Image (tube, rainbow, N blue to C red):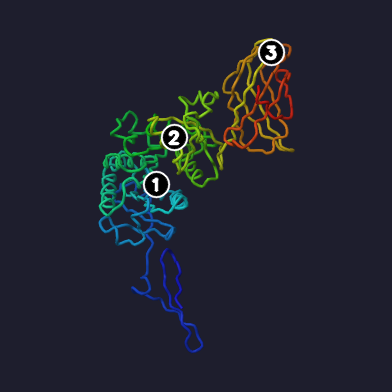
Amino acid sequence: MIVHSLIRGRLRVFEVQRAGGHWCVQWRLGQESGVDEQCDNFTDLDFHECFLGTTLNIKLLLYTKTNLHCGRQMNHHQLFSQPLFNLSLPTAFVIHGYRPTGAPPVWVDHLVQLLTEQRDMNVLVVDWNRGAANLNYFTAVANTRQAANNITGFILNMQAEGASLSSVHLIGVSLGAHLAGFVGANLKGKIGRITGLDPAGPMFTGATAEERLDPSDAMFVDVLHTDMNSFGLQGQHGHIDYYANGGFDQPGCPKTIFSGKSYFVCDHQRSVFLYLCALNRTCSLTAYPCSSYSDFLDGRCLQCEAFKPASCPVLGYDVSQWREVLLRLDQTKAYFTTTATLPYKKVSYRVDMVTWNQYLRWGVVILRLHSGKNFTEARVDRKLIRFEQYTSTRLLVQFDEDLQPIQKISLRIATGNVIGPRYKIRLLRIRLTPLEEPDRSLMCRYDIILEENIDVAFRPLPCDTRL
């Protein structure tokens, strides 16, 4: 009887026999047993090595559905020496960024697993830790060009053996996003796709298109921004650029330096965790094409007319619904907001109100949705909203929880008036449209009298489509 066992990263093959009333176990070697196989691991360096500086060395670790937990190092010039590498399948390259401590990225195994769940593919983890792990960031930046040339050579060997450049997808994190761009530029933009997760800002601010990630580096380039005011790069660098929470400070990340390391890396790393969540399909992060984050928050960009009959773009792996439109639009900016923790998704409603109050009032809107004893609240308080006679107002209102069914709605218009008489505000109509759940019904209510700064509760009604 032949038994296979994975022990400390090594595939052991045993032969178990019964002799003389006893079981005998013998470790088998040789071609018949499949040979003792060693898993190749990501380079793990210590602070001492980073302090002294490292010399660039690149390993390509192959993962497939067959060897999901045991990487195999690829030989650049003998692709067929690794039987698990199927050149007829798509290939994704995962490229990390600057590693000042030398430790392996905490997210890399999870990303490998989620990519193999999208479709049958080769996943190659580009381990350039010896070159990225250095206290001198400028040295790591300089190493990106040489690392890009190395990966370019490997992809050219793939092409020579029959692989299609259009089936290659480079996923670069931070400094790795620019490295991916250099590879794409070397290959004249003929690779299928580059995904940049918060491309690095230091040393790339003000850089030309040839000196950073750029839409011309691949047939399709998508970029996610989460830390543009620190370690990330501002601007547009893909066919579509996603800006989570405007691309700046992320919810739940520390706001003061007293939080230690997390203060410096939380916003920047959030790009990876949002992408992981999107691949896992636990959070469907819908983004709204818009000229600015301010216009998005003001509810001016909630239609996605250019993408119909498809929906608004969604962050993730599959871009087939929007790809052709995005390529036709050239460069698109798209915005979304998130919660502070998993699954990150906010529940978005377009709220349309028609007011008929006698006096002009300015205020903010506090809206609650009730389901049984539970409720979720949203405040639209980014700026004061104008309420006047027969005026239509459109708002984007986002909740942290998705409560269903909605049995009651509470509305308050807070004006800050604490001294004078309370003025009344009359709503001829309020309508709530669920933005990301098209199968859900619209909720309406007609002719409501509110007193400023006082909650008014009502049950939603089906909307009259004639109004």
Q: Nearer the viewer, mark 1 or mark 2?
A: 2
* Residue 139 seen in render: no
Given the image, on which type of amino acid does mark 2 rest? His
Give me the C-alpha separation between circle 1 and circle 2.
23 Å
Q: The residue tagged with tag 1: helix, strand or loop?
A: loop
Given the image, on which type of amino acid does mark 3 rest? Asn
**Could you say which disc has been placed on residue 357 in the image?**
3
| Front in this rendered view, residue 403 or 366 | 403
Q: The residue tagged with tag 3: helix, strand or loop?
A: loop
Left or right of residue 436: residue 329: left
| Front in this rendered view, residue 129 or 53 | 129
Give me the C-alpha separation between circle 2 and circle 3.
42 Å
Mark 1 or mark 2, which has the lower sequence index?
A: 1
Q: Residues within 10 Å of mark 2 (few under 14, many from 20)?
A: many
The residue beneath circle 1 is 101
**Could you say which disc has been placed on residue 296 in the image?**
none
Measured along the vertical axis of the image, is residue 89 above or below residue 234? Answer: below
Point 37% across, 52% down: residue = 124
Q: Where in the figure is residue 35, as x and y percent of width and height?
A: 36, 70
Q: Quadrant of residue 10?
A: bottom left
Q: Residues within 10 Å of mark 3 (few under 14, many from 20)?
A: many
The residue beneath circle 2 is 225
